[in-house]
Amino acid sequence: MTVSGPGTPEPRPIVPGASSVEQLRKEGNDLFKCGDYEGALSAYTQALDLGATPLDQAILHRNLAACHLKLEDYDKAETEASKAIEKDGGDVKALYRRSQALEKLGRLDQAVLDLQRCVSLEPKNKVFQEALRNIGGQIQEKVRYMSSTDAKVEQMFRILLDPEEKGTEKKQKASQNLVVLAREDAGAEKIFRSNGVQLLQRLLDTGETDLMLAALRTLVGICSEHQSRTVATLSVLGTRRVVSILGVENQAVSLAACHLLQVIFDALKEGIKKGFRGKEGAIIVDPARELKVLISNLLELLTEVGVSGQGRDNALTLLIKMVPRKSPKDPNNSLTLWVIDQGLKKILEVGGSLQDPPGELAVTANSRMSASILLSKLFDDLKCDAERENFHRLCENYIKSWFEGQGLAGKLRAIQTVSCLLQGPCDAGNRALELSGVMESVIALCASEQEEEQLVAVEALIHAAGKAKRASFITANGVSLLKDLYKRSEKDSIRIRALVGLCKLGSAGGTDFSMKQFAEGSTLKLAKQCRKWLCNDQIDAGTRRWAVEGLAYLTFDADVKEEFVEDEAALKALFQFSKDKPSFVRARVKKLLAAGVVSAMTCMVKTESPVLTNSCRELLSRVFLALVEEVEERGTVVAQGGGKALLPLALEGTDTGQTKAAQALAKLTITSNPEMTFPGERIYEVVRPLVSLLHLNCSGLQNFEALMALTNLAGISERLRQKILKEKAVPMIEGYMFEEHEMIRRAATECMCNLAMSKEVQDLFEAQGNDRLKLLVLYSGEDDELLRRAAAGGLAMLTSMRPSLCSRIPQVTTHWLEILQALLLSPNQELQHRGVVVVLNMVEASREIASTLMESEVLEILSVLAKGEEDPITRAAAACLGKSVEYGLIQPNQDKNCPLTSSPEFWITTSHTALLCRH
């Protein structure tokens, strides 16, 4: 019975609609056989939509499972196979396909149950028996791994919690190993069951940055996609304790805590979708309740005194990701309504806080914008007018509470909150502007002598000016004031903001002349002033940025654009302003890594957000490539989960994005242990992106790095070599062996040397009518020592595995003997060892070849090498001579009159009586 492709249904009576279902099913089968799995999916799905019989439905679902298996979408394959089994519990094909999907998903315990069921239904089926044996071996291997991991986990925690090991390299290595171990489900489970959460809590309590980061990143692995472990972790640590870590001053720790909370949220949210069942199938506490507790604590953190500005921003970011619905098709927006009722005032309080001078709440330059985005998303998630009216009422009541009876400080707070709303849900901001006295206070405060008061008022005016609805009101009431501020203020921070406000008003209405508020030519004058500020390198960068923002609004005007592109100095200033020196870039990379940017990007890749477009994926790939540019930074990227995040980026997105991600994977694979960087099955997923870099449309550097990375992978295991062969990489690697660039040629030869351990590659070299062997022999005689080493290594491997190749070496080139002698005489011991192994293989392969070698200078060289200190070279040389004695080609010298013949390493040939002694 065939179990890998879609099955053929049994003959059955024709029922209404069956002909269409049958036709589509057959069409799907034909497409599947041709390798068009996407087309087959479409045909089977259409057939299901036609109201197929239960028997047809079972067959179609199992066929869909087969398509998803071929497309390596194992979650969907499991789902479809399960649907088929629901229709027919004795469907062995569906059971087998579900076992294949479960195996790929790492759920071996469930996969083995399906296979046992298959064997019980068809006890003589060898495919099922072999699959059951294989999976049994994997389970045993997993058990061995888990048992060997026990001691490692205990040792790592012992080192980390030892006060005498403070700041040592040993402690740093232990923390990195713990993080890497936790990224695999088996390792995370072992840490969890070894009282790991309690021990990690002790690491968090130390307050040491490195230990806290290690603990948080390990907890990410424990909680990732596992609801029961997540709930257990929260019960030990306490949700309040985890959320409070967000508020610490250290940015890296705060960001790592943010990543952990995102992972916890994902695990809890998944539990709600699946009806309280995790992927491990265990019943857990109601995750909806845990989710509300988590969000409630985040809302409380927003207004807590003593929380860092960075922590507040991270809390807002989490709320942006957690609360609103992912799709308008989801009818349930109850979480949004609950957050509005419980936390809208807290969000507005952050949005209305001043950064300078510092208020009661610490905020950053990004806090107000983050609050605006959250408010906008909450407002957009509302479904009806009654819900939106409640939102408006709460906002207006909050603004009134500060505006009325709170003095000047209260008015400033209210106006800042209005600015926040204008940047977010502008409908709410516009309604707030219409509240009695608000707009008048904004205009009045623009004339204040206090800089901080002016800043708040002018920025509110600028944000209001960005809305066409308000432009006419502000033009009538505020343009003259903005002009006056620009002309008379002595403070650059006020002047430039006033200028940007004028720029916004100047661009209001776009090409709609009924909306134009300024006289003809005014926008050109504003743009000229912006260009003047931009070109003045004597003023600070912050002020010049405001000039760029002003130009961003004014360049909607065609005349402004024409003048700008003709201003060479302004264009150069703009380009120079956007560039940085390499040293600055490296410094920023270090700061980003220290701040935990890899964790943040990894979190972005994992979340199924509509924001993660193909363009966004490309940008993430570019950032990852920049982060791994320096060799010393790659370990940090790996420890924070960068390797795992790069895999989906290398397989999905724009062509450029996939190439950049693949190149970053290559860099990581070259300089780190691939088995640690990509543990478990993940290492096999790296091969395809690396092979994609071998295509001719990639740069020489990308070709080289891909070859180096594949060389590392090919040296690990036969299964990896088979994966490289399956991706059809060998012809491309062979092509690069002829490359003019010596580094690419050398890398390709090294890769081929490692691949030569596979039978399929050996068959290629053994096949008649090709020059593969000749190329290796010739490269073994090149001047490039590294190329010689790679080629000689390949020769040594091939002649050892395929003795028939030994007799062909003398046929490929007349210089073969010179090349071998040069290898044997090389001062480089690696070359010498590879050369003597090749000679030994040739001697053992054929008496005729051995005779030719012994009649040349090779005999004298081997005699000298055999007298050296005991090492692999000496042993191989002695073995060559010993085999030649066995053939009767040479014999030890027995002349007792020669003072040098007491050593058995001096030989004479039986065909030549000349004594070969080296004095």
Image (tube, rainbow, N blue to C red):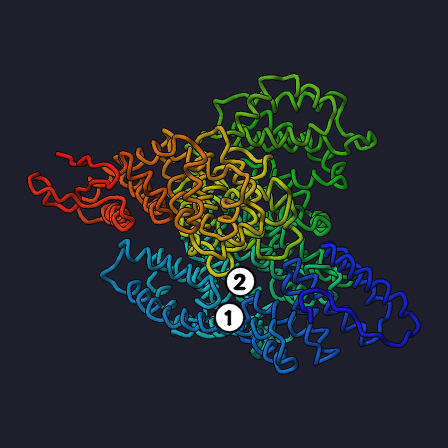
Q: Which residue is mark 1?
A: 230
Q: Is residue 464 visible?
A: yes
The image quarter containing residue 550 is top right
Query: Which element type, helix, strand or loop, lies under badge 1?
Result: helix
Determine whether, in the image, residue 265 is placed left or right of residue 898.
right
Front one among 703 and 619: 703
Q: Is residue 385 visible?
A: no
Marking on residue 401:
none
Tag 1 near tag 2, CB within 8 Å: yes
Amino acid on which the number 2 mark rests in the picture: Val
Amino acid on which the number 1 mark rests in the picture: Thr
> Where is residue 617 drawn, in percent x and y?
60, 46
The residue positioned farthest toward the right in the image shown:
16
Residue located at (51% from left, 60% from top): 681
> Where is residue 174 drawn, in percent x and y?
33, 59
The local crowd at label 2, few if under 14, some if 14 to 19, many if 20 or more residues have their Cα within 10 Å, is many
Query: Which element type, helix, strand or loop, lies under badge 2?
Result: helix
Residue located at (52% from left, 33% from top): 700
> Where is residue 280 drawn, in percent x and y?
55, 74
Marking on residue 263:
2
Quarter of the picture containing the N terminus is bottom right
